[in-house]
Image: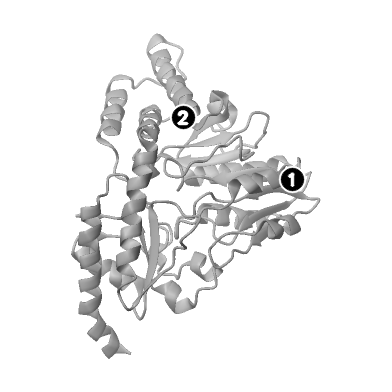
Amino acid sequence: MIYFDNSATTKPNEEVLDTFHKVASIYYGNPSSVHSFGLQTEKLLAQARRQIASLLNVGESEIYFTSGGTESNNLAIKGVANQFRNRGKHLITTKIEHPSVENACEYLKKDGFDITYLPVDENGRIHLDDLKKAIRDDTILVSIMHVNNEIGVIQPIEEIGSLLQNYPKILFHVDVVQGIGKVPIDFHKSQIDLATISAHKFHGLKGTGALYVREGVKLTPLLHGGNQEKGLRSGTENVPGIVAMAKALRLAFEDFNQKRHEMEKIRDYLRHELIKIDQTTINTPEMHIAPHILNFSVEGFKAEVLVNTFSEKQLYVSTTSACSSKRNEPSKTLLAMGVDQKRAESSIRISLSYENTIQEAERAVKVIKSSIEKLLPVMRGSI
């Protein structure tokens, strides 16, 4: 099996699974309980918070645990909107955000908020001038992803943060789900107020994530209950998952530069080999890109046909984001970049992890090439 769909989810690390099992089976007390068994669990929770904060170079009081990226994005966006709606009802994001950002913004539109969706250029990046022109007196939030989940382009987060320092009433939220552990980012240097991470993107477990909230930033909670997470995210914490997430993040940061370099080599090999196939076009630009994502289109083919054909040979890739792939819609990111509809409908995403090898890439290229050659007469006959 060749698993090249790591942007959808990664395989949990064995050490992470061991940690989860140990905590779940031994330290299963409720961290809110006041007895000694509950206090042991609470201690593990505090330790995980401290470790994650240290790895992200932020304060431990700035880390709030959630169920994952979707909840963290919704908490950040809706939390700011509801907290500061009297200050303004204008939000700025981009045309290529994850559905959990886009749909949260669309929900707010129904509640009277005004959303500006910034365009991107042919390389999938926003222009700072467009952002500056979009800012209004009633703007309260800018939400821009770090690494695009479909094509791997990196947005100029540090430059955006610097620009927003001229507008102290605007908060800056960054979805760093696809970049964390793969692309360096400094929350402080980038002047980020809110940042989203999700454990299952860096070999942790599904159902665990976190939201970084800069000290002093106030949000209106989405959930109300027992006042866990200082009242911002009520609900009994998933302590085994959280401790496992801390372990996964630590492992992701170990030998970071070497892992990144290995993924870059594999990605570049795939780019070099796939471009040799006549019907293939590479959609991922060559600059400002993450090491683990490569997007390409095959002329004359529907993406889902290729994905199903590859999977028959145990090569697992995806079309758009995992959240959108079952709808068989063209890539909204590619459309926003000016790519035509047919090419966007045939886009395939390869996404790597540090566990992938160059040998897997070599086998994958053979599968892709042989599958296209096999399907080509059929596709031509159907035209």
Structural crowding at the residue carrying mark 1, measured as other residues with C-alpha within 10 Å and reported as few (<14), some (14–19) or many (≥20): some
Answer left or right for 261 relative to 147: left
| Residue 12: quarter of image | top left
- Give neighbour class at mark 2: few <14, some 14-19, many 20+ (Cα, 10 Å): few
Report whether 61 appears left or right of 184.
Answer: right
What residue did someone put label 1 on? 85
Q: Closer to the camera, 361 or 261?
A: 261
Residue 296, horizontal then vertical, whole percent: 38, 67
Q: Residue at x 61, y 37 (%)?
A: 189
- Image vertical order of residue 273 relative to residue 169, above or below: below
For the residue pair 151 and 359, the one nearer the viewer reads as: 359
Residue under the image location 20 percent in, 72 percent down: 370
Horizontal side of residue 197 vs 241, given as left or right: right
Q: Earlier in the sequence, mark 1 or mark 2?
A: 2
Q: Position of residue 306 (x, y in %)?
A: 29, 71
Res. 253 image quadrant: top left
Q: Is residue 226 visible?
A: no
The circle on residue 55 is 2
Q: Position of residue 3 (x, y in %)?
A: 26, 54
Q: Does residue 116 show up? A: yes
Of helix, strand and loop, which one carries label 2? helix
Q: Are marks 1 and 2 in contact (CB under 8 Å)?
A: no
Helix or strand or loop: what does disc 1 sit on?
A: loop
